[in-house]
Image: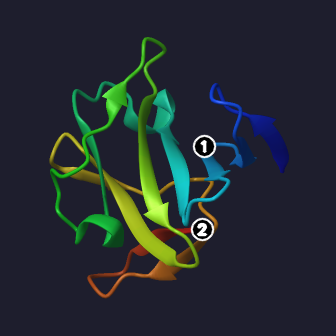
Amino acid sequence: MEAKKTAKGKESRTVAAQGIKKEYPKGKNVCRVTFRLPKVAASGAKHVYIVGEFNNWNMYANPMRKLKNGNFTVTLDLPMGKEYQFRYLIDDVKWENDWNADKYVKSPYGDSDNSVVIV
């Protein structure tokens, strides 16, 4: 974990795992989480959405932005002190877990797992 000063001189803490970056802005009760889905996991994808408990499993609420290197990314402010299950939806047909999630739990649907981020 590292502390850094923001442009406005405020301090925030950052925790980074490969693929998921967590920032804890000082004085706020949220964690700013940046999710990254690598190109290799979304090879040839046109659209990727992050779908999870934080958006009531709404498949289109949080589209991810495609970067020049082929990775997809999105940043969300999540209330702290919780665990959130989520998955990535690729081109409306393929579900993918985050390879660097904090943990995995069994999905109530089928024989798959859901990724979990803890903030």
Q: Identify whether 40 is placed above or below 12.
A: above
Residue sitting at x 64%, y 25%: 7
Q: Nearer the viewer, residue 45 or 3?
A: 3
- The image quadrant of residue 87 is bottom left
**Tag 2 secondary structure:** loop
> Contact, CB < 8 Å: mark 1 with mark 2?
no
**The residue under label 2 is which amino acid type?**
Val
Q: Badge 2: few (under 14), some or many (20 or more) residues near its Cα, within 10 Å?
A: some
Q: Which residue is mark 2?
A: 119
Q: Nearer the viewer, residue 91 or 1?
A: 1
**The residue under label 1 is which amino acid type?**
Gly
**Tag 1 secondary structure:** loop
Left or right position of 25 against 83: right
| 1 vs 2, front mark | 2
Using the numbered discs, state the Cα–Cα distance from disc 1 to disc 2 in whole angstroms.
15 Å
Left or right position of 68 against 2: left
Tell me the number on the disc at residue 19.
1
Residue sitting at x 32%, y 37%: 64
Left or right position of 102 against 107: right
Q: Nearer the viewer, residue 98 or 81?
A: 81
Q: Badge 1: few (under 14), some or many (20 or more) residues near its Cα, within 10 Å?
A: some
Q: Identify whether 81 is placed above or below 95.
A: below
Residue sitting at x 53%, y 50%: 32
Residue sitting at x 25%, y 48%: 62
Q: Earlier in the sequence, mark 1 or mark 2?
A: 1
Left or right position of 59 against 2: left
Looking at the image, the residue that sits furthest to the front is 9
Query: Which quadrant of the rendered structure holds the C terminus?
Result: bottom right
Q: Position of residue 116 (x, y in %)?
A: 52, 70
Colour setup of the view: rainbow
